[in-house]
Image (cartoon, grey):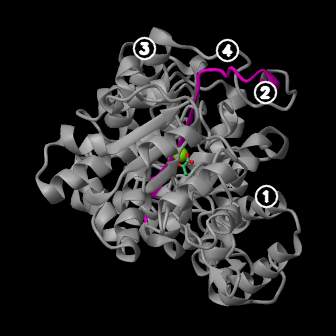
Amino acid sequence: MFSLNRSAFLNNPASISGSFPDKHRRILPTRVVVAGSSNRDKSNGSLLMATDESTATLKEMRDGYAEVVDPKSGVSGGVQDVYGEDTATEDQPVTPWSVSVASGYSLLRDPHHNKGLAFSEKERNSHYLRGLLPPTVISQELQVKKMLHNIRQYQVPLQKYMAMMDLQERNQKLFYKLLIDNVEELLPIVYTPTVGEACQKYGSIYSRPQGVFISLKDKGKVLEVLRNWPEKNIQVIVVTDGERILGLGDLGCHGMGIPVGKLSLYTALGGIRPSACLPVTIDVGTNNEKLLDDEFYIGLRQKRAIGQEYAELLHEFMTAVKQNYGERILIQFEDFANHNAFDLLEKYGTTHLVFNDDIQGTASVVLAGLISAMKFLGGSLADQRFLFLGAGEAGTGIAELIALEISKQTNMPLEETRKKIWLVDSKGLIVSSRLESLQHFKKPWAHEHEPVKELVDAVNAIKPTILIGTSGQGRTFTKEVVEAMASLNEKPIIFSLSNPTSQSECTAEEAYTWSQGRAIFASGSPFDPFEYGDNVFVPGQANNAYIFPGLGLGLIMSGAIRVHDDMLLAAGESTSF
Ligand SMILES: O=C([O-])CC(=O)C(=O)O
Ligand SMILES: [Mg+2]
């Protein structure tokens, strides 16, 4: 049962785009019936919006046409195109906004409200479901049991992922119940590592669109695109341009799996309503030749737009988001390439409620891990020497937050605390002689030292107590590197953070074996517990999933309009144990 709210669309002139030719009228109004006083309306009472008195009451709808009931006499007869309204003519623009209440067949196909076999007898009666479901009524508990059983039958993680996505599109309540009750088992499916594989194969496994796609083709129309999304009260957007998906590189439009996965955790771990979450992928092309040649690729087939063209689309998006959802909408930047990630954060950090998950969320969770590790190690962060492999978003973001925390703990100036932290990039140790040629976000880390090319030599030269991998390059913490850490430290702290598992700098097994069980290890993607000698080591997971759902919830609940470093420090400190 549906109602057409005239004032809603009359108040929304921006979306009026012209009159609908007859052929469209036949199709579009099938979602709409003007609210009336039939029994059906009463059963759905509170959700229906009263319409203007002068609007004829319609009680039946067939193929876009509805039977007219005169509101005064109650006499029915004739049909009226519900878009026609009493004053509309062919030349008058109409906008098909509606407040709708799903029932019957369409309710079973509405993932937000569908409960499948868990619809009670009463619900089946009042929502016109009788006969559309088999007679049995089962509990949600039993539905969870069945889904879990089915998912466990699949040997291949990608099949489990597809089953989960299918469920999310079919029965959202059950999807979240299943995920929340079995988060340890299912997080590696809807999130890293499996979501990485899903993005790589997104075109082949694509069946239904998820989230909002904004491409270069939509330039000048981004606000309209956002208004096409059915939910209006959005509180959080996760947006990517797909250029650096996990450690897998440029996956273009196939990056959509990431905002979808991240937002499912906003709900499952942060408790944000699913309808308040909007996944967005901005498609400016891809430089991934394999994808450009892939017949199943779902994005624009062109090289990435850069410079002004890129900046303009992003700016239109950022402006439209605020215009449409207000000052308090939270925007999480996700998996942008370094050059854009830092620029976007700087540009919009002072005008929007934004944070970059890869720079700031990851920094916060690693801070939590390091504060916790100090309990095993003794001493404080200020006593440590840090070496990073990888000087991109995560590397420099973590480095900066550690420097801030040490500065906060010791009152040392930030310039001094930064000197405890060294970074290695693809050209070797970042040192002052390289200053001129460094990208701006690397410059604060160019300390006095002679050049060092190889990681293992940097380990031996800097003698770090903590080694952190943020390189996006798998198996770069070689046996030699881990052994060097183990020879320098009684308890070497080794975090290999790159995702998914294939890109991890070393495995848990390697870290424990090569350090003879002495490493304090954490990774970005999960590793199973590992038996070594008489001990079972349970690797820590330092993934920003431990931060962003709670941080986002805090930002939303507090009504914050900007994200500040203190918030990230507080998130890291409170996540430590
Ligand atoms: O998504 C994850 O698992 C963590 C993350 O942000 C990344 O690796 O880019
Ligand atoms: Mg990320």
As for residue 15 lying within the magenta part, the answer is no
Sequence-wise, which precedes: disc 1 or disc 4? 1
Q: Split into 4 quadrants, where in the image is the C terminus? A: bottom left
Residue 107 seen in the figure: no
Q: Magenta region: which residues?
A: 272-291
Residue at mark 2 to residue at mark 4: CA–CA distance: 11 Å
Q: Which residue is mark 4?
A: 303
Q: Secondary structure at mark 2?
A: helix
* Marked residue nearer the N-terminal end (2 or 1): 1
Q: Which residue is mark 1?
A: 162
Q: Is residue 398 left or right of residue 224?
A: left
Amino acid bearing label 4: Lys
Coordinates of residue 512 in the picture (x, y in percent): 64, 68
Q: Which residue is mark 2?
A: 291
| Residue nearest the viewer, comparing 512 with 284 | 512
- Between marks 3 and 4 in the image, the one whose residue lies nearer the viewer: 3
Amino acid type indicated by mark 3: Ser
Q: Secondary structure at mark 3?
A: helix
Earlier along the polypeptide chain: callout 3 or callout 4?
4
Amino acid beneath label 1: Met
